Amino acid sequence: MTTETTTQLEALLTADGTTLPERLDHWAQATPQAICLYDGETDREYTYAEFGALTDAVAGSLARWGIVPGDRISVFTTNSLLAATLMFACWKAGAIYAPVNFSYRGRLLSYQLRDTSPRLLVTDAELVERIPEVAGDLADDAALSVAVFEDDAEAPVGGLPRVPWSALTQQAPRPDVTIGPADPANIVYTSGTTGPAKGVLQPHLWINQYTYGLRSLIDSRDVVYNDLPMYHVGGAFANVGRAIWKGAEAAIWNRFSPSEFWSRIERRGATAAILLDVMIPWLMKAPESEADRANTLSKVHMQPLPLHHAAVAQRFGFDAVSAGFGQTESGGPLKIVMLETAEGEGTPEHLRKGLLGDELTAACQERGFSVVDGTTVTEKGAMGYPSHFVEAMIVDESDAECPRGVPGELVVRPKISHIMMTEYIGKPEATATAWRGGWFHTGDSALQNPDGSFRFVDRMGDRIRVKGENLSSFQVEDLLNGHPDVQMTAVFAIPSSEGSEDDIVAYVVLVEGSRTTEDDLHGFAQEQMPKFMRPAHIRIVADIPRTPTNKIEKYKLKQDFTAQTA
């Protein structure tokens, strides 16, 4: 399709609904007794009727308490069910869901809360102790209140006013709020390369576009497994959101467990899942067994696509593997689906359910996604082709298009409005830079193959990926520089020994006369940083090489580290 009008494209995108709250309402009426969510932590099922009523009541309670459309609600919890409930309740109240990484504390936490400027912060008993640590940084935000899951205490939290939990869970009529496709839905944070993390404002139609490709792989008979956190677009929208969009079941746990992964799949008969690159080595390290294929998991999305995707699929009997490009800002503009196993070698017949075989191929092709033989995809990082709704291009540093086969920056341009991010909140210059020339600049290096498909090459700038989390060298440097004996820090990534992610290396210059050791700095990092952000290697040096204009020459540090560890 190359000549679609805007109206035709909008009709195509919204043929099975426009927004997620609308889809939950639809299934609560059409299949009220079907399972909507299964909470693996409490072993409890919620039907579409129950989850619809629960989120209606919480939305009503939020409105009764004083939340109005456009207000921001920060959700800081390890509890995936609580996050999912608040996500839909926020939307039904016209508010903005603003999840917070539950690994954060101290400066990372206070920065995001100040930047988001929420009206309400909802947390849980496990994390509430971190709020007093940052309450002083939030003192200027007089409008912020705190609610703690299942806690009716009224005493302030670190000086911030508290809302008793029962005030948010009373029976209350759903607010009379109309949600449009351009209305703000979420603020999700993404790492910055030369500054602090940026809050990405996503409209409701962004969720539709982001999940469009993954929705082609399932129908209401499927069960989507989720162990990704609900502060990630993958957990909140690609898994839980797409399941509810299609009237399927979302089986959710709070964290990934390599030892419990297959027992969880078996418990719910899960048919679809996302495997991030760090998860795959853990699963493949288990001793091979004749029972490896005796599971219901038939459709797996791998992000990014590993070179050995076919071997993984064939060992565990995955019928299909999908890949593409997913991003907090641009959604899911690229997609490919690979058929990985021959007839009779995939999911055992007695365990097959959901959208499979010719039905699956037809559904993907109808939505415009390439379906290929997995054995023909022999390049790491294959991302497929652009969806109907975007244009994609590879450009050089001057934004001129690169010849095919030449790496450059991946840029994408929407064909219809409101399917990509609206802005980086409070950062108009960063927003304008990212959208220069009418194309969104992804910050990722890629190339376009001769056949028109795209392939991921690397992250650009100082972006780092560890344990499925994206972060920037700036964030790690900023925290290490908070040590009283640290004068300067330079952080960079090296390839991890596992998967295709990174390990973090920090070179540190101490203040004159300091006796701080590398072990001391590792201890400081353990106190101040989430586990994924802590450097694997710290080197104390007398100085850090810089250019005449005082720019740190990290390439020289990488050369030095490589020579040391060779």
Image (cartoon, rainbow, N blue to C red):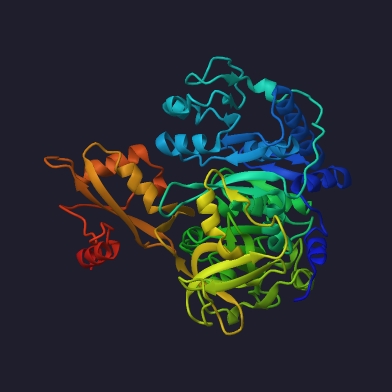
x and y percentages locating residue 431 in the rendered image: 55, 53
Q: Left or right: where does residue 83 sit relative to residue 380?
A: right
Q: Is residue 39 above or below residue 450?
A: above
Q: Residue furthest top?
A: 155
Measuring 70% from the left and 28% from the top, which residue is drawn there?
A: 62
* Number of dots carrying numbers: 0
| Occupied quadrant, residue 88 | top right
Q: Based on the displayed image, in which of its 4 quarters is residue 161 positioned?
A: top right
Front one among 293 and 162: 162
Can you give x and y, in whole percent of width and height, for residue 293 in the image?
A: 62, 66
Residue 156 vs residue 199, the one in the foreground: 199
Instruction: Using the rendered image of the protein, determine whether residue 394 is visible from the camera's viewpoint.
Output: yes
Q: Is residue 480 above or below residue 275?
A: above
Quadrant in the picture for the C terminus = bottom left
Q: Which residue is nearer to you in this view: 96 or 423?
A: 423
Whether residue 527 is situated above or below residue 499 in the rendered picture: above
Task: Give left or right: position of 331 versus 536.
Answer: right
